[in-house]
Image (tube, helix red, strand yellow):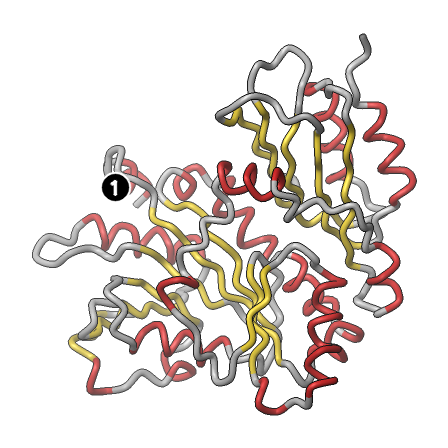
Amino acid sequence: MADDISRQGTADPVPVTLLVGFLGSGKTTLANRILSEQHDQRIAVIVNEFGDVGIDGQLIMSVDDNVVELSNGCLCCTVQGDLADTLRRLLERRRRTIDAKPFERIVIEASGLASPGPVLQRMLVDPTLHAHVQVDGVITMAHAKHIVQQLAENPEASEQVAYADHIIVNHCDQCEGDELAAAETALHACNPHADIERTTRAEVDVGRLLNKQTWDSARVKAAIENGVLCGEHDHEHDHEHLHTQGVGTLALRTDAPMDLPRLIRWLRSVSARRSHELMRLKGILHCQSHAQAVVIQGVYQWLEVRPAAGEPPAASALVLIGRHLDAEALRREWAECMART
């Protein structure tokens, strides 16, 4: 199977959106909306069970093994064993598509208790997948009425929020104004850099939602330069006060050029320590002996470092998102990675 996929040539990788959220948040409702709407996109949605989604029978064109083809060009595919194997089978099916236009993107609906980290890392480090799929964004659904309690009591919920690029606060019709404000405050404390959108019954603009490109290096560079990812305020104390299972964000900045090899060694050691859990990192750096800006991002122990267009930024900025981060120690170690002239 891997050999078949590898013969697909140099075609652009298929963008993948990971859809997560705690139990009852509305993931399946959103997956069903993606499958049933006329949105001019051919999307393959991977779910745990067809029955959970409840596909409208009038939309079904054909059923082939674990794949349902729909009249709007979308596919619905169930996870068969390992998710990576399901992705490989889906990509092979795409390669063999001759009579119809192949699907253009993939949405994975994760279990309500799943952490996004292992799924993301698998797509990023598996060579047979990384060459043919590209992470487009992590969409996290949150139940407006219950998310504050869920963040306080369930580490899975806080991880789902910490990895998010975009958060959909769903079931807003079940909340009073102060409850909704409290929900957004708790979400922001756990992940201050994700976009937040309010909705009821997962009524969202599917086309806009599934074209976030938040993992594209150019988008990361622009977000940090515009101050979206790296504000002056440190949210470490906020998330402790709101009891979000120790998950928070640390923003690091310096005007001094960085020693890139030393910084990479440091980040790898940070991701391997047992005293905390590093989930995500994003940054743009001014590095010694580099004429261009350097963009860096990571998940767990996966780390990507690449040059970016344009001159280096006036100041280097790095955002760390994780659990039980020791802000004082990390700031000290970050300072040690500055270039020594």
Q: Is 12 placed left or right of 138 in the picture?
A: left
Q: Which residue is mark 1?
A: 4
Q: Quadrant of residue 299?
A: top right
- Residue 234: where, in percent of width, then height? 82, 50
Image height of 180 relative to 2, above or below: below
Q: Nearer the viewer, residue 226 or 254?
A: 226
Name the quarter where the N terminus is drawn: top left
* Callout 1 amino acid: Asp
Q: Residue visible at 76% across and 51% down?
A: 249
- Residue 157: where, in percent of width, then height? 68, 69
Image height of 232 relative to 177, above or below: above
Q: Residue visible at 61% across and 22% down?
A: 312
Farthest left residue in view:
99
Farthest right residue in view:
328
Q: Residue visible at 69% across and 72% down?
A: 184
Q: Is 114 placed left or right of 201 in the picture?
A: right
Q: Residue visible at 16% across and 76% down?
A: 61
Tag 1: Cα neighbours inside 10 Å, few (<14), some, or many (≥20)? few
